[in-house]
Image (cartoon, grey):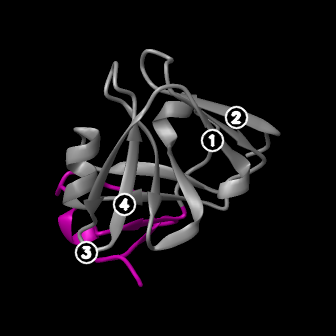
Amino acid sequence: MSADRRTASCSCGGLTAECLGEPARIGACHCTQCQRRTGSVFGVAAYFSREQVTLSGDRKVHARSSDAGRRIENYFCPECGTTVAWDLELFPGLVAVAAGCFADPHLGAPQRAVWAKYKHDWVQFPDSIAQLETQPG
């Protein structure tokens, strides 16, 4: 990964997240809430420090609890419904940006995946990606 600036956007382009520098980490999540949020079987996020991310455009906020009971605020486009970014109680200094919203195949792979106990049986990650049954506190 090497880019000074990356832009993630929703499907219609109305909500963007401009990210400076490299993410602190990239992670995958198999939790039931991420499955519902994405409409897929897991979610992938690039985590940036709050100072690295600027959100622009109209957005709505959906606050919810994680599978561990921690607060998460999802920022999504009111026009197309795409969740672009979210804040997590677990990582107060970081902003998660949906990896797929970058539409960049060179962003990088997750270092770990959490909530593997909810992983769909057919999903297989390489051995280089640590699989954690839950999410560490």
Q: Nearer the viewer, residue 72 or 37?
A: 72
- Kindly identify which residue carries mark 4: 72
In this rendering, the answer to whether 60 lies above or below 69 is above
- Kindly identify which residue carries mark 2: 6
Q: Amino acid at mark 3?
A: Gly
The magenta segment is 111-137
Front position among marks 4 and 2: 4
Q: Amino acid at mark 2?
A: Arg
State how far apart marks 4 and 1 are (Cα). 23 Å
115 is within the stretch colored magenta: yes
- First reached walking from the N terminus: tag 4 or tag 1: 4
User: Residue 18's x, y, as percent?
Assistant: 67, 35
Local packing at callout 4 (Cα closer than 10 Å; few below 14, some 14-19, many 20+) is some
State how far apart marks 2 and 1 are (Cα). 9 Å
Q: Residue at x 34, y 19 (%)?
A: 79
Q: Residue at x 25, y 74 (%)?
A: 69
Q: Say which mark, if any, is on residue 69.
A: 3
Q: Amino acid at mark 1?
A: Leu
SS for dot 3: loop
Q: Is residue 56 left or right of residue 71?
A: right
Front position among marks 2 and 1: 2
Q: Say which mark, if any, is on residue 107.
A: 1
State how far apart marks 3 and 4 are (Cα). 9 Å
- First reached walking from the N terminus: tag 4 or tag 2: 2
Q: Are marks 2 and 1 in contact (CB under 8 Å)?
A: yes
